[in-house]
Amino acid sequence: MTTLQSLTVRSAAGPYRVLAGPGALGRLGRLMRSGGLGRRAVVVSDANVAALHAPAALAALRRAGIAADLIAFPPGERSKDLRTAARLYGHLAALAADRETCVIALGGGVTGDLAGFVAATYLRGLPLVQAPTTVLAQADSSIGGKTGVNLPAGKNLVGAFHPPRLVVLDPLTLATLPERHLRSGLAEVAKVGMALDARLFAHLERHAEAILARRPGPLGAAVWGAARAKARLVQADERDRGPRRLLNYGHTVGHALEAAGGYRRWLHGEAVALGMLAAARLAVREGCLDAAGEARQAALLGRLGLPARWPRVAVRSLLPFMELDKKRTARGLAFVLTTGVGVARVRQNLSREALVRALRSLGAEA
């Protein structure tokens, strides 16, 4: 049996393990039992992922003697809202879920955020297990305890910190990932490299084509490298008030793009890649980053099949969403700006005019 890679994340609610390796999903029940989570579970998944991976997850749970049910919801970012959360609450009530019922988020970032939010708020908190099946979720969103849903006014405006009790990463599930979603997830890995880890960024540069071809070694190393970096920051700043904010690199503009596009035009990672272009241009204009660093980032994003040029989007359509961004303070917009590959800092009170000028220099309409 393959030995799983393991790391421990320490949180205020207690430590939890992140375990990764081929076939890990088939060991889900035993891993939960060993972590004291073995009485009853509800698997929450979108309909597409449920068809692909829920049978294996449910079988693994039942082999370990865990009673398990499945709740599926329509796929896509538009399901990450309070209406879908309310439907999930109704299903949990119908199943007579109690405080020992474990919610298992099986799927990508939308599922992890939505199921995590439901677990955080139903009966004032149910135990949560993250079983991510996308690059984005395995590398980033499944670790750290952030959960939430979107409002029409903006992304992730309603949420809660609710650390999982266990995270199980199975790289074999990535084989079923559509190509566009694979590329989208790699934006979050590139984000970590650009903002936090120059070695990870260099790994992406060396192996971009092999990673896109889903070669297990290079892809697995990229995902695990990002996950470890995320875990380090989460332990240092669980509540996102200090260094963890560096993980928001590319997200201020990225979230605004998603909301302005009605959560239909771009996948999350595609919007983040565009947000990284904006952040790099802003950093150059503010004297933080040299032009070579900006060009290096754009080149990598292009090699990973991500947007490397600004789309036809008017700045005025983005500003209302950035004004409501949850990272904004009374001092103004807060942006994560890089000073070099693998090094970033939070810049407070950036003026609206500086952002507008930077976006227009990329080709954005007024």
Image (cartoon, rainbow, N blue to C red):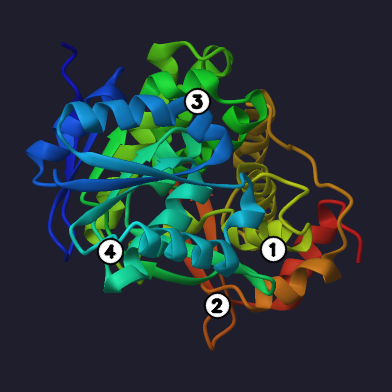
From mark 3 to mark 4, how far is it between C-alphas? 35 Å
Question: Which of the two residues, 302 or 348, is positioned nearer the viewer here?
Answer: 302
Q: Which of the labelled discs sits on residue 328, or is there none? A: 2
Q: Could you tell me which residue is drawn at 39 percent across and 61 percent down? A: 94
Would residue 213 be visible to someone looking at this image? Answer: yes
Image point (76%, 61%), residue name? 358
Q: Nearer the viewer, mark 2 or mark 1?
A: 1
Under circle 1, the secondary element is: helix
For residue 237, which numbered disc appears in the image? 4
- Residue 187 in view (yes/no): no
Query: Which class describes the residues within 10 Å of circle 1: few (<14), some (14-19), or many (20+)?
Result: many
- Circle 4 Cα neighbour tier, 10 Å, few/some/many (<14 / 14–19 / ≥20): some
User: Which is more toward the observer, 221 or 337?
Assistant: 221
Q: Is residue 171 above or below residue 9?
A: above
Quarter residue 328 falls in? bottom right
Gap between marks 2 and 1, in whole Å? 13 Å
Q: CA separation, marks 2 and 3?
A: 39 Å
Q: Which of the image's four quarters has the N terminus?
A: top left
Up/down of 37 relative to 222, above or below = below
- Circle 1 sits on which residue? 256
Residue 256 position within the rendered picture, expressed as x and y whole percent measured from the top left: 69, 63
Tell me if 285 is positioned left or right of 252 in this view.
right
What number is the disc on residue 52? 3
